[in-house]
Amino acid sequence: MKRYAPNKNALISIRIIILVLAAAVTALSYMFFNNHNIIMWIIISVCWITAILYGVFFLPIYFKHTVYNIYEDDIRKKTGMIFFSKQYMKIRSIQYISTIITPFSKLTALNFIIVNAWGGRMIFCFLTRDETMELSSYLDEIAKNNNN
């Protein structure tokens, strides 16, 4: 059995992206709604409350509860924030995989593997670049063997 979990660098990267987006919305709100103070402050408040909720509460819970297990015969994914879900896929049913490696992935860990099977799809999110390449090559070999 091999166990994978989302990398903490991805959490930091997502938090930075959220902060940049919240600052951009604040600046745009100030630029366009400066004459309408109530609307401007409502937009800014909602934006920052949402950013803080996701950055401080929801995302860390999601990262803490997400686990990918690769067994000899199957793949299992357990994830969730408030509602938890489990996905299960037989290794022999894998048809093809897609690997997405983002720029600066060694720093950000914003990498994804999409595993497609008959009637289903499983997405592995936020793995390190090395884990993504390792798991991708392993699953690719399985998919090649299944299709031959």
Image: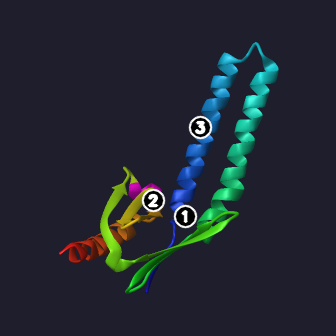
Q: Is residue 7 above or below residue 108?
A: below
Look at label 1 and name its amino acid: Lys
Q: Quadrant of residue 110?
A: bottom left
Image-based side of 10 in relation to 18, left or right:
left
Colour option used: rainbow
Look at label 3 and name its amino acid: Leu
Give the residue at the far front of this rendering. Answer: 119
In-front residue for pair 136/17: 136
Percent across and percent down for residue 40 are: 75, 24
Which residue is rendered at x = 30% and y = 75% of the image?
Answer: 138
Residue 109 shows which numbered tag?
2
Q: Is residue 13 magenta?
A: no
Query: In the rendered structure, which disc, 1 or 2, sits on the residue that comes first in sequence?
Result: 1
Task: Identify residue for label 1.
Answer: 8
Percent across and percent down for residue 147 are: 22, 72
| Predominant SS along the magenta part | helix
- The region drawn magenta spans 105-109
